[in-house]
Image (cartoon, helix red, strand yellow):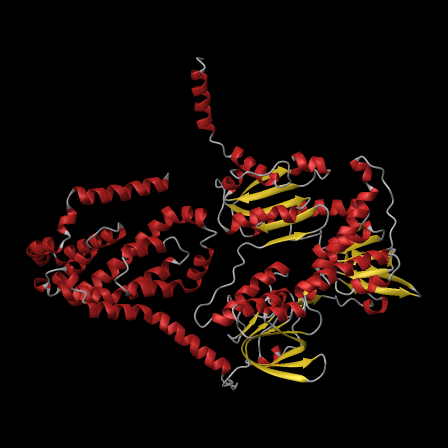
């Protein structure tokens, strides 16, 4: 109501301005006709006239009324160059700031709520460089100032910054008009004040901050490269270090645009995902899921049986799956695509030179215009006393180590309660291991909502896993051939015996051995990069797990596009990497998939939201498949159908999430999903039904009440 009142007041003042023909006064002809009266009034009450003029100027600029240019001429004619400039400079800046605040109060929340997802990049740019943009706009009179006031009010630029930048930026234009006003009798039209030469001068002034920014960047680059000798010619356009997801996509893009690119890999093509992560783990999960279904076949009206299998054959299948996928990432395929692939260890010697210790012997040095570091990550092994004595495997090494076993480990300890730990704990439990899962945090999968963590723990517990949350690993011990891990919980120590221990407590970027320290490239947990994925050296980029902030194969491929395009074409146009819509999934049963915000993140960031939920236990296809468990939970802007985030728990949750990822990426709301035909009977109908739940909760009750009366009247009631 307050906003409506303010809007009504503004509208009334604008209407009054035109109703009383004040717009006729604020013309060049009107000004010349009124000059005699102004001079007489000023002679009688100079202070009063100055104050009234100041107040009138503030009102005109605040309400975005036509005539500010005429008032500026009047200031020069009545108060002279110095007095007129002072009056106009402060009045115009105050009026512009009031218009800015009015726009912010009336429109910003509405615009941000409706288009906030699309405006993220603009908001971030304004927060970082907003004062420079504003200064540029203020210097160039070609841009209507009232539009600048209104549009800037929708951005996050600070009010104080807006005021002083406006006052400083408008000063040059103010001087020109006030000075012209001192010669009012000679002016025949406003267009004559700004000659083409003067306009060009303003434009040059306007682009000066951009040129200055470019010059600063050039100087900074020169300083960074000062101690290095740049080659006169280059052997390659791009050298990529690491043939995981980020490296493969980067080199593929470079070859596709006909750049000369070399990809260097020290170990296996395909990186962690193919050889140690996504591919083998999903193959193992499938085998374990079939074993689980056999044990619970009565759920489908069949006779339950205890699966008989050779664990070595299960592991052989895992390796067969890796081998079947490997040609997609092979040396032969990428060579055929136009990528030179070298097997060996790469080290950056200087910003343009990579030295490769070749696997088949010898070394090779390549000069290159740009470098992309895509070295990936490795499992983190905690500094646990006695760990090396008892022995352990990681998510990287278990595939070869366990392939030697005739049976799964009888007693397996899984250290870690994140996605990797949960997936592998459930898989080995279903294959017959007695699994104890140890997590130091108070619950599993801490990045998810509490209800998701509880559901995941219940699922693992039902599979026979002894889940110990809130337990901190202290040390490992060996008693003869027996192996133990000692954990602490609520001040008490617990000793757990095991046959095999799996460390799954996270992954850390591979940072050593690539020459980063010698070049002075900052690293902490990852390689430090800017929004364009540039390191300290603008021609050296990092992408994928080695750069973060996410450690997913799909985000590595996503980052690779930005790294490749910026590395090859950054002299003309650079692109900031976009993390606005990032999906991920944990492939336990039931699957957990998410994109955007969940409830705990929304609360942490103090973002207002509404929750709409649909239980998959009510879905026809899920009931038919015997997978009627889980839910779809959507967070939306209060009162709007714009999606802030989605969490899905259930069968094929990772696949079902794709529709919401697409919707969020392209600004589609729940109404669009509701209006889309979904095949019956499919699990994907859950997405439509959750949209229907939102629609039902936001049904216009007053309208429906009137419709009920209308239909009653139609029936003759």
Instruction: Please give the name of the residue rendered at 63% of the width and 79% of the height, measured from the top-left corner.
Output: 347
Quarter placement of the C terminus: top left
- The residue at the far right in this view is 480
- Total numbered labels placed on residues in the image: 0
Instruction: Please give the name of the residue rendered at 19% of the width and 65% of the height, measured from the top-left corner.
Output: 194
- The residue at the far top in this view is 716
Q: Quadrant of residue 496?
A: bottom right
Q: Is residue 49 visible?
A: yes
Question: In screen coordinates, is 523 left or right of 104?
Answer: right
Q: Is residue 554 above or below residue 666?
A: below
Question: In screen coordinates, is 181 left or right of 571?
Answer: left
Quarter placement of the N terminus: top left
Question: In screen coordinates, is 682 left or right of 608?
Answer: right
Instruction: Please give the name of the residue rendered at 69% of the width and 85% of the height, measured from the top-left corner.
Output: 362
Instruction: Please give the name of the residue rendered at 46% of the width and 31% of the height, measured from the top-left corner.
Output: 700
Task: Pick the residue in front: 362 or 18.
Answer: 362
Q: Is residue 90 above or below residue 374?
A: above
Where residue 506 sits in the image (x, y, percent)? Answer: 70, 62
Task: Pick the residue in front: 387 or 238.
Answer: 238
Where residue 19 sits in the image (x, y, percent)? Answer: 17, 41
Where residue 223 sits in the image (x, y, percent)? Answer: 47, 81
Where residue 466 sits in the image (x, y, percent)? Answer: 81, 50
Q: Is residue 487 visible?
A: no
- The residue at the far front in this view is 336
């Amino acid at each position: 109501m307050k906003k409506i009142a303010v809007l009504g007041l503004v509208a009334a003042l604008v209407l009054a301005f035109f109703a009383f023909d004040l717009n006729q006064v604020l013309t060049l002809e009107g000004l010349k006709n009124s000059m005699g009266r102004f001079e007489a009034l000023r002679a009688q009450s100079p202070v009063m006239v100055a104050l009234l003029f100041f107040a009138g100027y503030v009102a005109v600029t605040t309400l975005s009324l036509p005539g500010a240019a005429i008032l500026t001429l009047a200031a020069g004619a009545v108060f002279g160059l110095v007095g007129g400039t002072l009056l106009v400079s402060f009045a115009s800046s105050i009026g512009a700031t009031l218009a800015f605040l009015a726009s912010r109060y009336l429109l910003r929340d509405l615009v941000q709520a409706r288009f906030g997802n699309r405006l993220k990049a603009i908001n971030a740019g304004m927060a970082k460089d907003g004062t420079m943009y504003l200064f540029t706009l203020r210097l160039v009179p070609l841009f209507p100032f009232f539009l600048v006031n209104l549009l800037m009010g929708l951005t996050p630029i600070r009010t104080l910054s807006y005021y002083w930048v406006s006052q400083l930026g408008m000063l040059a234009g103010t001087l020109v008009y006030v000075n012209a006003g001192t010669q009012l009798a000679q002016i025949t039209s406003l267009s004559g004040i700004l000659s083409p030469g003067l306009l060009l001068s303003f434009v040059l002034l306007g682009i000066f901050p951009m040129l200055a920014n470019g010059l600063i960047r050039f100087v900074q680059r020169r300083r960074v490269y000062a101690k290095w000798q740049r080659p006169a010619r280059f052997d390659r356009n791009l050298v990529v270090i690491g043939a995981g997801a980020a490296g493969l996509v980067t080199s593929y893009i470079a070859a596709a645009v006909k750049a000369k690119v070399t990809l260097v890999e020290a170990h296996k093509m395909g990186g962690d995902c193919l050889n140690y992560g996504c591919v083998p783990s999903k193959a193992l999960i499938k085998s374990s899921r079939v074993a689980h279904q056999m044990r619970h076949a009565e759920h489908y009206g069949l006779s339950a049986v205890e699966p008989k299998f050779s664990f070595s054959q299960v592991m052989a299948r895992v390796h067969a799956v890796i081998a079947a996928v490997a040609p997609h990432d092979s040396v032969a395929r990428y060579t055929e695509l136009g990528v030179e692939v070298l097997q060996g260890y790469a080290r950056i010697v200087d910003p343009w030179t990579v030295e490769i210790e070749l696997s088949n012997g010898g070394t090779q040095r390549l000069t290159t215009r740009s470098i992309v570091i895509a070295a990936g990550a490795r499992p983190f092994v905690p500094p646990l006393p006695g760990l090396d004595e008892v022995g352990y495997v990681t998510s990287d090494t278990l595939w070869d180590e366990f392939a030697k076993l005739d049976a799964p480990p009888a007693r397996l300890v899984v250290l870690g309660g994140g996605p990797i730990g949960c997936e592998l704990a459930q898989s080995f439990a279903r294959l017959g291991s007695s699994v104890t899962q140890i997590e130091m945090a108070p619950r599993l999968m801490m990045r998810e909502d509490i209800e998701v963590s509880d559901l995941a723990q219940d699922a693992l517990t039902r599979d026979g896993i002894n889940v110990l949350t809130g337990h901190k690993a202290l040390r490992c011990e060996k008693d003869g051939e027996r192996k133990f891990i000692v954990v602490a919980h609520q001040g008490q120590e617990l000793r757990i015996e095991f046959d095999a221990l799996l460390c799954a407590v996270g992954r850390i970027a591979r940072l050593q051995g690539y020459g980063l320290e010698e070049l002075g490239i900052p690293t902490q947990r990852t390689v430090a990069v800017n929004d364009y994925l540039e390191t300290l050296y603008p021609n050296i980029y990092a992408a994928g797990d080695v750069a973060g902030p996410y450690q997913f194969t799909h985000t590595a491929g996503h980052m690779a596009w930005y790294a490749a395009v910026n590395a090859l074409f950054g002299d003309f146009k650079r692109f900031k990497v976009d993390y606005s819509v990032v999906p991920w999934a944990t492939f336990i049963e039931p699957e957990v998939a998410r994109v955007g915000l969940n409830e705990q993140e929304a609360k942490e960031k103090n973002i207002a939201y509404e929750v709409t939920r649909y239980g998959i236990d009510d879905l026809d296809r899920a009931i038919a498949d015997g997978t009627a468990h889980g839910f779809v939970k959507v967070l939306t802007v209060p009162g709007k159908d714009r999606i802030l985030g989605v969490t899905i728990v259930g069968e094929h949750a990772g696949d079902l999430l794709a529709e919401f990822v697409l919707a969020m990426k392209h600004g589609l709301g729940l109404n669009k999903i509701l209006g889309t035909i979904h095949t019956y009977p499919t699990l994907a109908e859950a997405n439509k039904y959750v949209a229907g739940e939102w629609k039902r909760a936001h049904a216009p009750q007053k309208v429906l009440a009137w419709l009920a009366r209308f239909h009653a009247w139609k029936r003759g009631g």
